[in-house]
Image: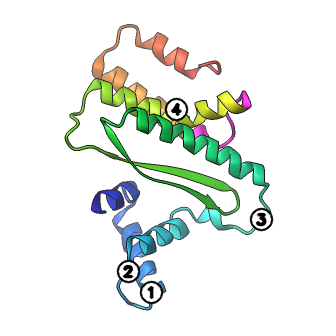
Amino acid sequence: EIKYLTTLLFACSCADIEAIVNDAYLRKDMKKITVEDLENSINLLVHKELFVEKEIPEYNAFETAIHEIGHALLVYKYRKYFDLYRISILRGSYYAGRVITLHKEEAPNTLEKDVADIKIMLGGPMACKLIYKEVLQGAENDLMRAKQRLRALVNTQGFINPEYVLRRFQSPDA
């Protein structure tokens, strides 16, 4: 579970991690904490915008589920590179989903693995596009991450005509 926790805490600062552990510890009355306790503290402290009281339409939960299923299906397709660890949907001021994958240590870092990772990032938005005929609100983060990863690949791999690739990726039809 250490791999899973490092995945959850990847973008956190040392101060964030200290706050998360302290929160989990205090909520358990200073008793032994579990991974679930840490997850709850991460959701409260890092994803605090999710926990504003507000009425949420149920269709939003279904849209979020479709989005996360899109990611999960592609993780399954590329299971030689990734393990699907968990899918969760958090209910707060809106529904937010998360598919947590772990990179298989035995799978070397290759161009094919990087491309598979980008495809997984795009799986959620594309599932919504298939079902709803549009990319729904909330997919911006996935699209931005995929775009950044693609730019990094273009810069490191030196694809032929990278301007075309990036222009095509930025267009609303892509």
Tell me which residue sits at (21%, 34%) in the image.
Answer: 108
Of the residues under marks 1 and 4, which one precedes in the sequence? Answer: 1
Of the residues under marks 2 and 3, which one precedes in the sequence? Answer: 2
The residue under label 1 is which amino acid type? Lys
Residue designated by label 1:
28
Residue designated by label 2:
33
Tell me which residue sits at (44%, 75%) in the image.
Answer: 37
Disc 1/disc 2 C-alpha distance (Å): 7 Å
Q: Residue 137 in magenta?
A: yes
Q: Residue 126 occupies which quadrant of the picture?
A: top right
Q: Does the magenta stretch mainly form a helix, a strand or a loop?
A: loop
Image location of residue 101, percent across then percent down: 39, 47
Image location of residue 74, percent across then percent down: 46, 34
Of the residues under marks 1 and 3, which one precedes in the sequence? Answer: 1
What is the secondary structure assignment of the residue under circle 1? loop
Residue designated by label 3:
54
Give the magenta part as a residue range.
132-141
Marks 1 and 2 close (CB-CB < 8 Å): yes
Of the residues under marks 4 and 2, which one precedes in the sequence? Answer: 2
Is residue 69 rendered to the left or right of residue 79? right
Disc 4/disc 2 C-alpha distance (Å): 35 Å
Residue designated by label 4:
122
- Can you say which quadrant of the picture contains the C terminus? top right
Q: Residue 13 in magenta?
A: no
The residue under label 3 is which amino acid type? Lys
Q: Which of marks 2 and 3 is in front?
A: 2
Of the residues under marks 4 and 3, which one precedes in the sequence? Answer: 3
Question: Which color mode does the image show?
Answer: rainbow
Image location of residue 68, percent across then percent down: 56, 44
Marks 4 and 2 close (CB-CB < 8 Å): no
Q: Nearer the viewer, mark 1 or mark 3?
A: 1
